[in-house]
Amino acid sequence: MSNRQPTPEQLRVDAEENELLANFRRAQADLYDNAARESAAGIFHETEEYLRLNQAVIDAGKRLPKGLKRLAKDI
């Protein structure tokens, strides 16, 4: 175990990666919430809103850094 403190650059990169991951997770949550609402309302086809939110998840997944791409492998 190293006692070295992260450099300002490492902290910046970590913060950016965390923000990208948070954006991806928010997009997923929005999609899942919408799907649940539509399903509860008896809507079982891909609505414009579903397609928009699904595209947002895909786009957010593409912005993930290489080390985090595995989290978006199913999209």
Image (cartoon, rainbow, N blue to C red):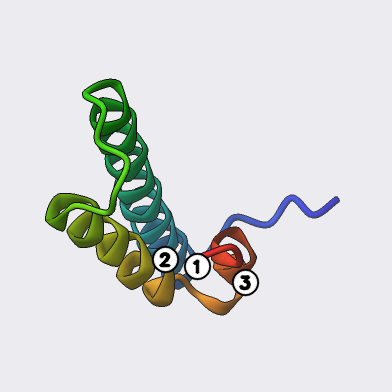
Q: For the residues marked 1 and 3, what is the alpha-carbon distance in whole angstroms?
A: 15 Å
Of the pair 59 and 66, the residue shown nearer to us? 59
- Asked if disc 1 and disc 2 are in contact, CB closer than 8 Å, the reply is yes
Where disc 2 sits, the SS reads helix
Q: For the residues marked 1 and 2, what is the alpha-carbon distance in whole angstroms?
A: 5 Å
Of the pair 27 and 43, the residue shown nearer to us? 43
* Mark 1 surroundings: few (<14), some (14-19) or many (≥20) residues within 10 A: few
- Front of the two marks 3 and 2: 3
Numbered badge on residue 67 = 3
Q: For the residues marked 3 and 2, what is the alpha-carbon distance in whole angstroms?
A: 20 Å
Q: Quadrant of residue 13?
A: bottom left
- Asked if disc 3 and disc 2 are in contact, CB closer than 8 Å, the reply is no
75 relative position to 23: left or right? right
- Mark 2 lies on residue: 8
Q: Quadrant of residue 11?
A: bottom left
- Front of the two marks 1 and 2: 1
36 relative position to 10: left or right? left
Position of residue 56 relative to residue 40, above or below, is below
Q: Type of residue at label 2?
A: Pro
Of the pair 48 and 21, the residue shown nearer to us? 48
Q: Which residue does the image show at 21% across and 23% down from the upper left? A: 41
Across and down, in percent, residue 18 comes to 42, 54
Of the pair 37 and 15, the residue shown nearer to us? 37
* Mark 2 surroundings: few (<14), some (14-19) or many (≥20) residues within 10 A: few
Q: Type of residue at label 3?
A: Gly
Q: Which residue does the image show at 30% across and 50% down from the upper left? A: 27
Where disc 3 sits, the SS reads helix
- Front of the two marks 1 and 3: 3
Q: Which residue does the image show at 43% across and 62% down from the upper left? A: 17
Q: Type of residue at label 1?
A: Gln
- Mark 1 lies on residue: 10
Across and down, in percent, residue 68 comes to 58, 65
